[in-house]
Image (tube, rainbow, N blue to C red):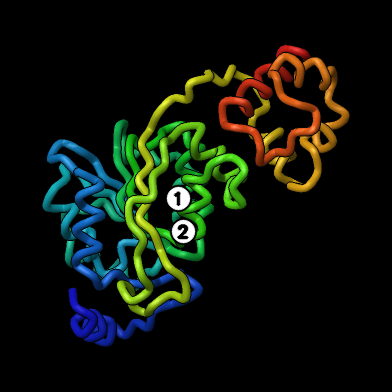
Amino acid sequence: MTLRELRQELSRLGIRPSKALGQNFLIDGNILHIILREADVRRDETVLEIGPGLGMLTEALVERAQHVVAIEKDPRLCRYLREKFSRVALFEGDAVEVLGGRFAALGSGFKVVSNLPYNSSTSILERLVEADLKPRRMVVTLQREVAQRLAAKPRHKAYGALTLFTQLHYHSTVAHVVSPGCFYPSPRVDSAIVVLDRRDPRVKLRSGALFPEIVRAGFGHRRKTLKKLLAGRARLDEAFAQAGIPVTARAEELSLEEWITLANALQETA
């Protein structure tokens, strides 16, 4: 869909793009091609799209997948999408809330292929990576800043809690940087296409280990040492020694495997 065609369709529907809903519509066919190439959707697969908008990506997914499930918050766009795509299972509502419920429509082994709404991309990703039923692969377009956080390495300023929660379950790769002009209206920042492939980390996280709690505590004050931020936990020195982590280490210096090892050690010494 060209910019002219998109504007005409929005005008016909009486819709003005909403910043509050994070509405930036993709208008670049080359970017669409890259998304589809990275997603590699097969005929027997189920795909979830979040924020389909006017359905530029949806149309291509319907042609490729066995089942397409979509979540759209704007009721006006929902009406439009229902008329246009009879084969799409469309859920109307906020994606964070929909994904937080018992969302059994996806089955197992599904993929997520989406241009995520800018205003809720982080919350949506957190829902997806922490869900009991996790996607096998995600190909998502989102703010470049968030993309860098997902793929960050230790000691990088973008490395943080979201990095670790994501990389605990997924290998993250920034596949392509997308300029603002590829969307209407143009956002004020660059975007990026991120590919997340489901994987298990080299070190296994034990059931009951307090990984989320210590990660959040560790990145609460990045300048303080991790030991100070975890002070008060039983046998902390023993856990640090068992994990082989210096007492002077800060949260951003630890690899994912070191975080898992520390969480396991804290569970053992509790």
Identify which amino acid the numbered label 2 is placed on: Asp
Q: Secondary structure at mark 1?
A: helix
Q: Using the image, tell me which numbered label, if any, was put on residue 202.
A: none
Can the viewer see residue 91? no
Residue found at the far right of this picture: 232
**Viewport quadrant of the N terminus:** bottom left
The answer to whether residue 113 is above or below residue 51 is above
- Name the side, left or right, on which 129 lies relative to 39: right
Dot 2: what SS?
A: loop
Residue 32, image x, y percentages: 22, 61
For image coordinates 45% across by 60% down, the residue present is 144
Residue at coordinates 80% horizontally, 38% vertically from top-left? Answer: 225
The residue shown at (30%, 72%) is: 182
Give coordinates of residue 37: x percent, y percent: 20, 50
In the rendered image, residue 125, in percent from the top left (x then y), is placed at 47, 48
Question: Could you say which is closer to the camera, residue 43 or residue 191?
Answer: 191
Q: Is residue 3 above or below residue 192?
A: below
Residue under the image location 35 percent in, 45 percent down: 195
Q: Mark 1 belongs to which amino acid?
A: Val
* Crowding near the residue tagged with mark 2, few <14, some 14–19, many ≥20 C-alpha atoms within 10 Å: some
Disc 1 target residue: 98
In the picture of the structure, the residue carrying the numbered disc 2 is 94
Query: How many residues crowd around disc 1 within 10 Å: few (fewer than 14), some, or many (20 or more)?
Result: some
- Using the rendered image of the protein, determine whether residue 52 is visible from the camera's viewpoint: yes
> From what the image shows, is residue 100 above or below residue 31?
above
Up/down of 5 relative to 91, above or below:
below
Rendered image quadrant of residue 172: top left
Q: CA distance from mark 2 to mark 1?
A: 6 Å
